[in-house]
Image: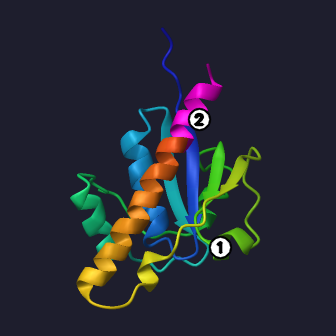
Amino acid sequence: MATKVPSNVLILCTGNSARSIMTECYFNAVGNRQWRAFSAGSKPTGQVNPLALTILAEAGLRPENARSKSWDEFASLDAPKMDVVITVCDNAANETCPLWPGSPRTLHWPFPDPAAAEGTIEDRMATFRGVFELIRRQVDAFITEEAAAKH
């Protein structure tokens, strides 16, 4: 039996520090080797938000290689070919994106920015948890719909 090559998905956000990182990590955890996720930003902050890492750890996920990086890494001809490109913030959705090799399908999932949350650490963590729950639901629904469409 031939091994199925996973489909690649690129998650984009402006800063690539929270939403896109959490989405990438969750996708890779539940993608059942059928999906391989990457994330990037148009204007990366250069660091992953520590609260995003805390939320991922709470969920039992290990973002071992998580880093804030530019979408330019994925626009070159030698980059992995993307099957789907998903923007997770309105800013990135409204920016002029590079032309992705292979003309992947594009989607927009407008999650609120948890990094913009204010208040106590508990308030900010609650915001991150809420956004992560939205991410989980969206990714789970996407994977379920894609699996159903293939059968």
Mark seen at residue 145: 2
Q: Do residues under tags 1 and 2 come within 8 Å of each other at their CB atoms?
A: no
Which residue: 64% across, 53% down?
Answer: 85
Note whether residue 112 is visible. yes
1 or 2: mark nearer the eye = 2
Q: Which residue is mark 1?
A: 90
Extent of the magenta region: 142-151
Give left or right: position of 25 versus 102.
left
Q: Quadrant of the C terminus?
A: top right
Badge 2 density bin: few <14, some 14–19, many ≥20, Cα 10 Å: few
Q: Is residue 49 above or below residue 71?
A: below
Res. 90 image quadrant: bottom right
Q: Nearer the viewer, residue 95 or 81?
A: 95
First in residue order: circle 1 vs circle 2: 1
Indicate the position of residue 48 as horizontal and vertical percent values. Answer: 37, 73
- Magenta stretch: includes residue 146: yes
* Type of the residue with mark 1: Asp
